[in-house]
Image (spheres, coloured by chain):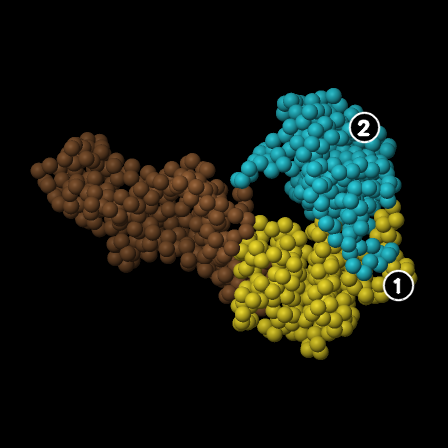
Amino acid sequence: MRVEIQNLTIAFPTATGISHAVRGVSLDLGTEKLGIVGESGSGKSLTARSILKLLPRSARITADKLSFDGIDVLTANESAMRAIRGRRAGLILQDPKYSLNPVMTAGAQIAESWRMHRKGGAREARAAAIDLLAQVKINDPGRVFDAYPHELSGGMGQRVMIAMMLAPDPELLIADEPTSALDATVQAEILRLMEDLVARRGMSLILISHDLPLVSHFCDRVAVMYAGRIVEQLGAGELAQAKHPYTRGLLDCMPALSQPKPRLPVMTRDPAWLA
Amino acid sequence: MSATTGQSWRDWLLTDTPASRRQAAWGERYRLWCSFRSNGLAMIGLVVALAMVVLSLSAPLLASYDPGTQELANRLARPSAAHWLGTDELGRDVWSRILYGGRVTLGMVVAVVALVAPLGLAIGCIAGYFGGFADRALMRVTDVFLAFPRLILALAFVAAIKPGITSAIFAIVLTAWPPYARLARAETMTIRNTDFIAAVRLTGASPARIILRHVVPLCLGSLVVRVTLDMSSIILTAAALGFLGMGAQPPSPEWGAMIATARRFILEQWWVPTIPGIAIFVASLAFNLLGDGLRDVLDPKQR
Amino acid sequence: MIKIENLHVHFGAVHAVRGVSFNVPAGASFGIVGESGSGKSTVLRALSGLNDDWTGSMRIKGTQLAPRRGKDFFRRVQMVFQDPYGSLHPRQTVDRALSEPLEVHGMDQHERRILQALSEVALPPSVRFRYPHQLSGGQRQRVAIARALMAEPEVLLLDEPTSALDVSVQAEVLNLLADLQERRGLTYLLVSHNLAVVAHLCPMVGVMQGGEMVETVSREDLRAGRTVHPHTTELRRLSTELEEA
């Protein structure tokens, strides 16, 4: 499985003209964990979602190349995209409260996702769902299977969401701020779980986040986006060697527990970064 | 030249940095108008509704006859050059009666709306904002009114006083307010728990001030939408009361009453009852389209 | 300035805050950290008067607080909310939001006070007549801070004031809060889930878990890892782990 993006541009028409949200992004993804980091409005989510063609209807998308495992996403029709979405590539969103169906039990939703992509009876689906719940390290899968989303904590809900996305055995998982709504203790558990599953199943992962230290801690490679462009790509653990002033600025302006900073450095945005 | 001043007006309205309260307010209105304008059906509704109001208001100028003048020799005439829409059973000019009837019918609608909207808004906002006992008491009263079929309640009310336009207006108001109160209450209950209302409470503002200045403006959008959607049913209720002889009294030309008196001729002289029917239909449709368009613009939930 | 003793808050059958006590001297900052559901925001809302179903004792400047607060309380204590998108009225301009406290308290010189408040939170006068949807998240939070300062309070309650902001904007807002405190001698009560943010602004930190304040620790002890309660240690470990990466 390989995702290739070359010179991707996403634009939106507005009342006063056209605004470019993503400007000429090129990315290559193999079987690895790629982090995309940036502030709100940097185009990180749009870039990742363009692979699944899950963009707002008004978006105008152009690229020299945008392919998922050799399939040209730009020219693919809806039914070809549906074969990728959910089946070959899953999407995990920020808040499980909004992405799970509130009137279906967690187990039913996982079972449905499993049956949609693999033919099987209700009993097999139930067994598969319970197995998946166990895989996302839920201690009592039988109880969670019959629970409704509102009866689950945020961390539990996110595990259910991950289990649902794993059901069709995808090759790529896109996680859009998967832990931003969760507490620090739960966040660490969910990330560890995702790391473990990705390694075990040989999946690719795109982790989208605003949290640079978190992403670089967790991913093999990090792309830093600013105003619709990738300004810097870093390997794991190379955060300290970041060269671009924007990346440096992002790291410096965070308050740190280990060393006191009497005053936080404020980022001055150089217009040259946009060039 | 005019193109450039037009452009500068547009820039003044759409600027991201207004220089005064007035400019900011007009800019916001202009933005709403722009998004309303892009909806073709809603524009048709607006134009038709405005045209009907203007036509009714200028009835004395446009009417070719006095609406009360009888010409018994020429009763139930077909539409002709002399009588554009024909004459009714007493030989009165239908075109003139439609114009003057618009004043009565649309006037009733306006009067009903002017009374119903503030009443429903006040009851709903108070119930929704305070909750608890006030909410339960006011909502039970609302339920009582909702429990009666609308037309029957209006009929009973008019029959109890004396038939006429004023009592018809009050009867419709009496039956039309509960849905507005329910709507305003539901809106208020979501608004009252927002942080921005909490912030106003923390300035020490009184509940009256919070409701009037912060809650009501937000309810207004969906209320206006509901009103325009309801206008057609108010017209129909007014017409129904007129039809049953409980609304406008003869010889006053009210659209519903015009149908009622002419219904005997529906088979032989079909145009006599049909023309006021078309007027009612067009007015209802126009207000409905207008309401749909306003909902797209004003109702934040649909955005 | 703030003295809270044995505060309990119930939501129906849920005992959300179980006997919390702490003190904040005038001009100082006290931070409360905890995870969601620990009751940290509930303490703030009870103190601010938004929730009047509590028992215990709360004093501001020695005055015992009743469940219902008078206008003088709201001149003395103000609050800044987490979500700058939700805390500004969507149909009101910045000007309207800032004049509201002035009108409620019958204060004079609106024009001068509004312009001064904008410059104090480093916003250009051009934002004065804009609507919230025309502002960025950071600008909105500055407006919310300016609004809280309009009535010239002595105590500012900060409920996750930077959690919804990007880190670069968070730095600007935290600097602004530090400057304002220095200039006006404000007393801060800051609630956050982010240990680093709390330690940055507050010399004293209270850690909450399950409705109880399990530990009160100085910022220096927290930095050095001299913590007693396992929950504090765990939160500290998670926070420093990423910093060292």
Indicate the quadrant where residue C189 lies.
Answer: bottom right
Mark 2 is surrounded, within 10 Å at the Cα level, by few (under 14), some (14 to 19) or many (20 or more) other residues, namely some
Q: Is residue A198 left or right of residue C126?
A: right
Indicate the quadrant where residue C72 lies.
Answer: bottom right
- Parent chain of label 1: C
Q: Amino acid at mark 2?
A: Gly
CB contact under 8 Å: marks 2 and 1: no
| Count of marks placed on residues | 2
Which sits in the foreground, A245 or A228?
A: A245
Considering every residue shown, the one lying at the far front of the view is: B1
Q: Amino acid at mark 1?
A: Asp
Q: Looking at the colours in the rendered structure, which chain would you say is drawn in yellow?
A: C
Which sits in the foreground, A262 or B93?
A: A262
* Residue drawn at x 77%, y 73% as measured from the top left: C25
User: Where is mark 1, residue-wise?
Assistant: C221
Q: Identify the secondary structure beneath mark 1.
A: helix
Mark 1 is surrounded, within 10 Å at the Cα level, by few (under 14), some (14 to 19) or many (20 or more) other residues, namely few
Which sits in the foreground, B22 or C199?
A: B22
Placement of C231 over or under A174, stated as above or below: below
Q: Is residue B2 left or right of residue A17?
A: left
Q: Is residue C107 left or right of residue C233?
A: left
Which sits in the foreground, C130 or B161?
A: C130
Q: Looking at the colours in the rendered structure, which chain would you say is drawn in brown?
A: B
Q: Looking at the colours in the rendered structure, which chain would you say is drawn in cyan?
A: A
- Parent chain of label 2: A
User: Where is mark 2, residue-wise?
Assistant: A30
Q: Identify the secondary structure beneath mark 2.
A: loop
